[in-house]
Amino acid sequence: MQLRINDWLEDSIVDGPGLRLAIFCQGCPHHCPGCHNPATHDPQGGRLIEVEQLTALVKRNPLSAGITLSGGEPFAQAAACAALAREIHQLGKTVWTYSGYTYEELLCRQDAADLLAASDVLVDGPFILSRRSLELQFRGSDNQRIIDLTKSRAAGTLVLWQDPWQEDFPPALR
């Protein structure tokens, strides 16, 4: 199966915890003002790549924590992204997915179900330039949530992701 991507970045430390392969999917319907990656907006841009090629990049790095599907909009290619996510899980790695849609919007979309099920964490919501903050961990604006999908599925309700490194710190230091 093929995925249309703009590019990828190996050993990213800003797109989720640990060293991650950040994959910038091509095509985005949101066109958020101030987007950090506007080159990904055109759905016909970028290039096609086999899912197996991206999986091989993760396999060759024993320190990789997993992948981050970013954009563009991964849910514009949900089937291919879900196939890749399942391959990454077979390697024992995690999958973080960024989306300009909210979790609630994605739950209403039948075509989103497989990618949601194959993702461990979802960073949801559009980037809003007026709410931008460089102090936020793994997100660009304070309207975006980091949702622990694994815990949300188990609890039957939305559970926000907690950085395991910060859980032991007092709230004033988080």
Image: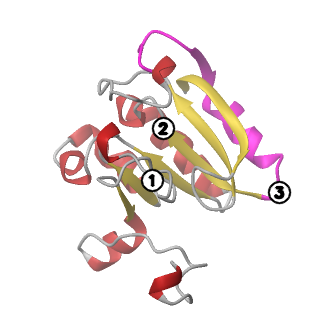
Q: Position of residue 68 (x, y in %)?
A: 56, 47
Query: What span is colored magenta in the figure?
Result: 41-63
Q: Considering the image in quadrants, where does the N terminus appear?
A: top right
Q: Which residue is mark 1?
A: 118
Question: What residue is drawn where x is 47% and y is 84%?
Answer: 172
Does residue 20 appear left or right of residue 133 in this picture?
A: right
**How far is mark 2 from mark 3, CA to CA?**
22 Å
Numbered disc 3: secondary structure = loop
- On residue 81, which mark appears? 2
Q: Give the mark toward the camera: 3 or 1.
A: 3
- Which residue: 38% across, 46% down? 132
In magenta stretch: residue 65: no
Residue placed furthest toward the top = 44
Q: Name the one closer to the observer, 10 or 114.
A: 10
How many marks on residues? 3
Q: CA distance from mark 1 to mark 2?
A: 9 Å
113 to 70, vertically: above or below: below
Q: Is residue 44 magenta?
A: yes
Q: Where is residue 131 drawn, in percent x and y?
A: 32, 47
Regarding residue 126, the answer to whether it shows in the image is no
Q: Is residue 165 above or below residue 41?
A: below
Q: Residue at x 46, y 48 (%)?
A: 97
Report the residue at 50% width, 77% height from top.
174
What amino acid is labelled 2 in the image?
Cys
Mark 1 vs 2: CB contact within 8 A? yes
Which residue position holds label 3? 62
- Give left or right: position of 125 versus 22: left
User: SS for tag 2?
Assistant: helix
